[in-house]
């Protein structure tokens, strides 16, 4: 019954889980600060740390700057306007970069140069975040655990592996406060052909590699970026061939975009908990058999951090609370 | 900072999730369906001339449309700033105390679920029963007349109405795809019904109608000229109009177009699924208002011309007051009389019924979404957000909402008192006005969120656009709260009913604090679901 008082036992662990921040600095700072704010013992970031767009801010001959915002170009006439614009773009998850008009004209049709610029800015942002987490969590025993999403460049791996207060794991089983955590990043195939995508067969192989390493499945947490297929956690808008959402009577038509191999594995293995992301619209908390599966979703462009506070106690999921901070 | 136009200066890489959804057209269709255009025009023409003699129905529609446009403007700025699904609960929970945010949401959802029951009741009372009766009149088969009378007795009414509500819940349980398929068919039929009504009215004249009506209804009402007799008996029994515009009545009667127009802002419930949110929500909301007004203005003008304002007023007055010569003057049925065709009567009535049906699953869905959101935030029981593993729908929340609507149906049918609790709409409008009022201050109290809004840099008279829009919306909502409050016909302020509305607010607060304590005993602090995490 929902009003039943739960026992307060000794091995209680509260995990604050968020995912898919896509470069939003304000959301990342909220996530790190969420440990103290929510009284969490463990921070888990589910992947897709990296953003999706670079915003060139081009200096003009008259000393003003031109930037791009919500569908149109804006002129920034003062240093205050420039600073405010840069801050806003950072918080939205984009990468502002100041360049001359000539540099912009040179790079705007050069895909290779754009990709190089993108990776440079992404790595810089991840390094800033890692430094921020290290500073904020210094002196605490709160682990910061993360693993890659499908959109994350491979270039961020070195930054996160080298960060002193970040535990970056992929295709590993680790120990977290008396529980095991299985880390499996990336996603199934997407229409965008992103960095880390795998077929269903590859996911079957990946789980087949990891499952034998788990000592006690009843105390195992699946930190798997892609959600299980055929659930509310993987429900997203259906796209047409032009990557536009399909609508029916004003309502978006939905489809499933999760991983069937994960559903099958959870159904068969029955781990304690699954924490997932990838599908921003798939916010929810479900059961697959006895396994609790959570996707907190993501609304990072608004600067609001969606998360999940999961409390584990005595080898069981005591509570799951979805948050919007 | 100024808009400088030109080429798009942004480099985008291949990445998943770049999907925001409904276009302006989609949002327009969603909202127009929830305006229930047919129900609006039928209720305006039924209650307007009867109880607001001298009230200019065309001007009242324009007044209601202007006010609703202001409310929509306010909600557009809210949903552009917080483009997420969930309606006023999402907005309120970002700035108001959590208990108040939940309470406003609960009040709003109670009203919408109550109106689900009323819509089911009206389908029978104003749609099916009169259609049966007039089919009986036109065909001369009395069994239709008897059937029309039988289905509005309490138990048949309750059972059929509950069946409609359970059907709505069942459709939602099956899944969104099935629901949308049903709605698409219903929407097309409803629009065709409205077009047919306009065509029938445009091709007739007052002389045609009077002749047809007198020929058909003379034997039934046992008078040679029932059209004239209805008008005369209405005037004898108190219905009065001197042929001029009464401005007070015009103001009060605008409640009737305002009530269905509320549906034009319901796309706040799907804010998270709307792409180009500023443009789409603007077109969607304002387009639905304009679209509904166009259909109403044409239909009202034609109805007045063909049936006669005086006849419509006295006929409804006689029927509602139980005096004089009585007949049902619902315009869908009068259109059937005008043509003398049972088929036209059935088709136009079906169009009207379909418009009312559009309301039921639409508002049902609105309620279910809020209930699931409460559960997500742990201020509602966990089973409410439980998702069916086979249907992927929140079955428990749907069943709970359906049970509430059936309970309202029972109260509406079996008790005289609850059949008059239409003032719940006042509570919903009040809840909206509070959220709009909070929006006035949002840019100042939550600058870190507002600065990311696409309208953050837009100013009107030097003030943030959201502040201006929500000020307009707040005053428009307050205007109609008090207009409804002062109108005994549309809503009113009967002390017992006002107490019930106040009681719902109290229940919301009590519910929140009880859940808060329950969760606290489980080690969960529900207030965390609403709080902003500090950045530094």
Image (cartoon, rainbow, N blue to C red):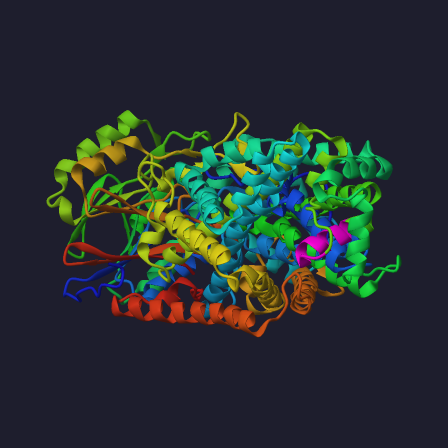
Q: Magenta region's main secondary structure?
A: helix
Quadrant the C terminus of chain B occupies: bottom left
Task: Please state which of residues A323 and B406 is positioned toward the viewer in this rendering.
Answer: B406
Tally of numbered discs: 0
* Residue B198 colored in magenta in the image: no
Task: Please state which of residues A106 and A213 is positioned toward the viewer in this rendering.
Answer: A213
* Residue at the spot 54% in from the left edge and 72% down from the top edge: B496
Is the residue B210 above or below the residue B66 in the image? above
Residue B484 appears at what percent x and percent y?
Answer: 66, 65
Write down the region rendered in magenta.
Answer: B312-323
Residue A305 appears at what percent x and percent y?
Answer: 43, 56
Question: Furthest-left residue in view?
Answer: A215
Is the residue B380 above or below the residue A269 in the image? below
Task: Tell me if A189 is positioned left or right of B71 in this view.
Answer: left
Quadrant the N terminus of chain B occupies: bottom right
* Residue at the spot 41% in from the left edge and 60% down from the top edge: A30
Task: Please state which of residues B221 and A229 is positioned toward the viewer in this rendering.
Answer: B221
Residue B22 shows in this picture: no
Residue B149 appears at what percent x and percent y?
Answer: 56, 44
Q: Quadrant of residue B73?
A: bottom right
Residue B244 shows in this picture: yes
Is the residue A322 above or below the residue A233 in the image? below
* Residue at the spot 58% in from the left edge and 42% down from the top edge: B129
Residue A8 appears at what percent x and percent y?
Answer: 17, 67
* Residue B314 colored in magenta in the image: yes
Task: Please state which of residues A147 and B407 is positioned toward the viewer in this rendering.
Answer: B407
């Amino acid at each position: 019954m929902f009003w039943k008082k739960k026992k307060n036992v000794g091995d209680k662990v509260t995990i604050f889980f968020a995912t898919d921040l896509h470069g939003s600095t304000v959301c990342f700072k909220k996530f790190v600060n969420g440990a103290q704010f929510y009284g969490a013992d463990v921070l888990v970031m589910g992947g897709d740390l990296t953003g999706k767009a670079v915003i060139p801010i081009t200096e003009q001959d008259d000393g003003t700057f031109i930037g791009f915002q919500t569908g149109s170009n804006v002129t920034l006439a003062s240093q205050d306007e420039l600073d405010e614009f840069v801050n806003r773009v950072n918080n939205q998850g984009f990468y502002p970069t100041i360049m001359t008009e000539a540099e912009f004209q040179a790079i705007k049709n050069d895909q290779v140069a754009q990709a190089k610029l993108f990776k440079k800015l992404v790595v810089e942002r991840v390094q800033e975040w890692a430094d921020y987490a290290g500073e904020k969590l210094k002196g605490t025993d709160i682990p910061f655990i993360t693993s890659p999403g499908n959109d994350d460049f491979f270039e961020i791996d070195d930054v996160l592996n080298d960060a002193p207060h970040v535990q970056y794991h992929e295709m590993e089983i680790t120990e977290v406060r008396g529980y095991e955590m299985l880390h499996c990043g990336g996603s199934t195939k997407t229409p965008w052909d992103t960095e880390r995508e795998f077929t269903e067969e590859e996911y079957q192989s990946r789980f087949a590699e990891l499952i034998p390493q788990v000592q006690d499945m009843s105390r195992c947490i699946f930190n798997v970026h892609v959600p299980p297929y055929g659930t509310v956690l993987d429900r997203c808008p259906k796209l047409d061939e032009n990557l536009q959402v399909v609508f029916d009577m004003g309502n978006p038509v939905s489809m499933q975009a999760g991983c069937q191999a994960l559903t099958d594995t959870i159904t068969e293995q029955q781990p304690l908990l699954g924490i997932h992301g990838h599908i921003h619209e798939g916010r929810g908390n479900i059961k697959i058999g006895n396994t609790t599966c959570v996707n907190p979703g993501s609304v990072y462009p608004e600067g609001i951090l969606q998360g999940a506070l999961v409390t584990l106690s005595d080898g069981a999921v005591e509570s799951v609370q979805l948050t919007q901070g | 900072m100024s808009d400088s136009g030109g080429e798009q200066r942004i480099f985008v890489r291949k990445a998943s999730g770049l999907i925001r959804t409904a276009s302006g057209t989609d949002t327009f269709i969603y909202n127009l369906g929830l305006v229930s255009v047919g129900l609006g025009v039928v209720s305006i023409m039924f209650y307007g001339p009867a109880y607001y003699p001298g009230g200019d129905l065309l001007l009242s529609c324009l007044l209601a449309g202007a006010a609703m446009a202001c409310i929509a403007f306010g909600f557009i700025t809210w949903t552009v700033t917080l483009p997420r699904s969930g309606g006023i609960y999402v907005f309120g929970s970002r700035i108001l105390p959590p208990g108040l945010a939940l309470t406003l949401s609960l009040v709003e959802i109670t009203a919408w679920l109550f109106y689900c029951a009323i819509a089911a009741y009206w389908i029978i009372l104003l749609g099916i029963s009169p259609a049966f009766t007039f089919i009986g009149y036109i065909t001369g088969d009395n069994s239709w007349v008897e059937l029309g009378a039988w289905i509005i007795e309490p138990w048949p009414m309750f059972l059929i109405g509950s069946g409609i509500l359970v059907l709505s819940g069942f459709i939602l349980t099956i899944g969104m795809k099935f629901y949308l398929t049903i709605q698409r068919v219903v929407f097309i039929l409803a629009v065709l019904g409205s077009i047919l009504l306009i065509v029938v009215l445009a091709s007739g004249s007052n002389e045609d109608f009077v002749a047809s009506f007198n020929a058909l209804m003379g034997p039934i009402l046992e008078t040679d000229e029932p059209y004239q007799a209805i008008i005369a008996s209405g005037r004898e029994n108190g219905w009065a109009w001197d042929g001029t515009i009464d401005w007070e009545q015009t103001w009060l009667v605008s409640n009737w177009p305002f009530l269905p127009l509320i549906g034009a802002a319901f796309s706040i419930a799907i804010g998270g699924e709307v792409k180009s949110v500023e443009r789409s929500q603007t077109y969607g909301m304002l387009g639905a208002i304009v679209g509904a007004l166009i259909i109403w203005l044409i239909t009202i003008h034609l109805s007045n011309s063909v049936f006669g304002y005086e006849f419509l007023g006295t006929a409804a007055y006689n029927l509602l007051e139980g005096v004089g010569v009585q007949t049902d003057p619902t315009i869908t049925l009068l259109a059937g009389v005008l043509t003398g065709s049972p088929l036209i009567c059935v088709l136009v009535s079906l169009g009207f019924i379909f418009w009312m049906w559009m309301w039921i699953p639409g508002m049902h869905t609105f309620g279910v979404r809020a209930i699931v959101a409460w559960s997500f935030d742990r201020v509602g029981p966990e089973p409410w957000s439980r998702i069916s593993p086979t249907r992927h729908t929140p079955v428990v929340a749907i069943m709970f909402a359906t049970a509430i609507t059936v309970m309202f149906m029972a109260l509406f049918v079996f008790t005289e008192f609850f059949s008059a609790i239409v003032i719940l709409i006042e509570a919903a409008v009040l809840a909206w006005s509070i959220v709009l009022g909070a929006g006035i201050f949002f840019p100042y109290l939550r600058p870190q969120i507002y600065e990311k809004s696409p309208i953050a840099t837009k100013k009107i008279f030097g003030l943030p656009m959201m502040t201006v829009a929500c000020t307009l919306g707040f005053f428009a909502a307050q205007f109609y709260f008090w207009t409804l409050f002062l109108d005994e016909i549309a809503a009113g302020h009967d002390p017992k009913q006002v107490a019930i509305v106040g009681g719902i607010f109290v229940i919301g607060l009590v519910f929140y604090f009880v859940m808060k304590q329950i969760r606290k005993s489980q080690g969960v602090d529900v207030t965390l679901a609403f709080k902003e995490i500090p950045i530094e």
